[in-house]
Image: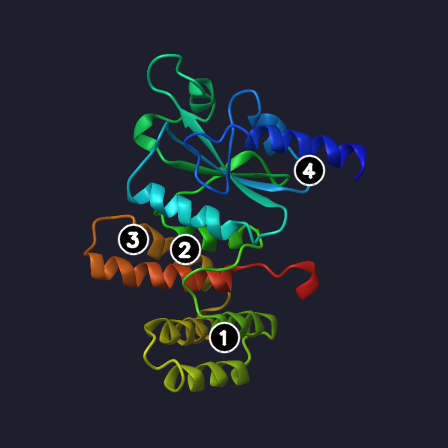
């Protein structure tokens, strides 16, 4: 191991030692370690800013994402617990990113492309966070999509909206995956892309995300979130290896 790699290993190890109140699979950062860790070259970090000892459904989603994220190369999930009273640990980091306690939990992606942090604005759900990370070139496995259709979606975009790929998707949707409502969403999106062009993906993603963040019935919200996840697959940019 080179000297630089050894120093980074020691740094990450020191962060991992402070795990009290930290979700399994997440680094605990503070105002001493935050900049050193998030500026690590070649790595991406999803950082959650939240109250100390967070709990509830959103924290459960965070824990699920942490356990899933270990599979992604050069990527780690971290959290910054902010104390509201007493010593007010890490409150300076909250101020730096212009957050209030009403914003918690707040998620930011840090890497070489987003040195100041790119904020996530969607619902706090493990599958939606993973989907968003994939759109930011983080190679985390998807959650809540259909692997066979994911591959067809990439092929469809790569091959200039191929009729053959669309026909294959329709066949799968009407056959093997006829009971999975997401299968039909892939087909519908392919048809819309052929009709309106590639820009349909980004514009529809923005439109549906805005609706999903509003007040909608639980059943409708689930449908919208399924569509967001599938649109996210089409929105992914191919890696150098896939070009």
| Labelled pair 4, 2 in contact (Cβ < 8 Å) | no
Specify few, some or many for label 2: CA neighbours under 10 Å numbering under 14, 14-19, or 20 or more. many
Q: Which of marks 1 and 3 is nearer the N terminus?
A: 1
Q: What element carries label 3?
A: helix
Q: Distance between the residues labelled 1 and 3?
A: 26 Å
Q: Name the residue under label 1.
A: 148
Q: Earlier in the sequence, mark 1 or mark 2?
A: 2
Q: Say which of 20 and 32 sits in front.
A: 20
Q: Distance between the residues labelled 1 and 4?
A: 34 Å
Specify few, some or many for label 3: CA neighbours under 10 Å numbering under 14, 14-19, or 20 or more. many
Q: Name the residue under label 2.
A: 127
Q: Distance between the residues labelled 3 and 4?
A: 35 Å
Q: Distance between the residues labelled 3 and 2?
A: 14 Å
Specify few, some or many for label 1: CA neighbours under 10 Å numbering under 14, 14-19, or 20 or more. few
Q: Say which of 229 and 208 sits in front.
A: 229
Q: Quadrant of the N terminus?
A: top right
- Residue 180 visible: yes
Q: Name the residue under label 4.
A: 41
- Residue 122 visible: no
Q: Which of marks 3 and 4 is nearer the N terminus?
A: 4
Q: Which of marks 3 and 2 is nearer the N terminus?
A: 2
Q: Distance between the residues labelled 4 and 2?
A: 27 Å
Which image quarter: residue 159? bottom right
Q: Name the residue under label 3.
A: 212
Whether residue 62 sits left or right of residue 162 in the image: it is left
Specify few, some or many for label 4: CA neighbours under 10 Å numbering under 14, 14-19, or 20 or more. few
**Measured from the top left, where is residue 175 in percent x and y?**
39, 87
């Amino acid at each position: 191991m080179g000297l630089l790699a050894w120093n980074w290993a020691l740094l990450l190890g020191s962060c991992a030692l402070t795990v009290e109140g930290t979700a399994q699979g997440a680094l605990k950062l503070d105002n001493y370690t935050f900049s050193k860790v998030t500026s690590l070259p070649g790595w991406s970090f999803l950082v959650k800013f939240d109250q100390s000892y967070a709990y509830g459904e959103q924290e459960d989603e965070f824990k699920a994402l942490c356990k899933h994220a270990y599979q992604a190369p050069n990527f780690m999930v971290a959290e910054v617990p902010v104390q509201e009273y007493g010593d007010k640990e890490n409150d300076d980091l909250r101020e730096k990113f212009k957050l209030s306690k009403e914003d918690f939990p707040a998620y930011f992606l840090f890497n070489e492309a987003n040195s100041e942090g790119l904020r996530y604005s969607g619902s706090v759900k493990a599958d939606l966070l993973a989907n968003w990370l994939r759109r930011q070139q983080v190679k985390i496995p998807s959650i809540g999509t259909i692997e066979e259709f994911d591959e067809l979606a990439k092929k469809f975009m790569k091959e200039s909206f191929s009729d053959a790929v669309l026909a294959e998707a329709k066949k799968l949707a009407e056959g093997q995956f006829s009971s999975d409502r997401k299968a039909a969403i892939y087909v519908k999106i392919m048809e819309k892309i052929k009709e309106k062009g590639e820009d349909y993906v980004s514009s529809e993603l923005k439109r549906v995300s805005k609706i999903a963040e509003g007040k909608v019935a639980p059943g409708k919200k689930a449908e919208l979130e399924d569509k967001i996840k599938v649109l996210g697959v089409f929105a992914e940019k191919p890696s150098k290896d896939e070009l």
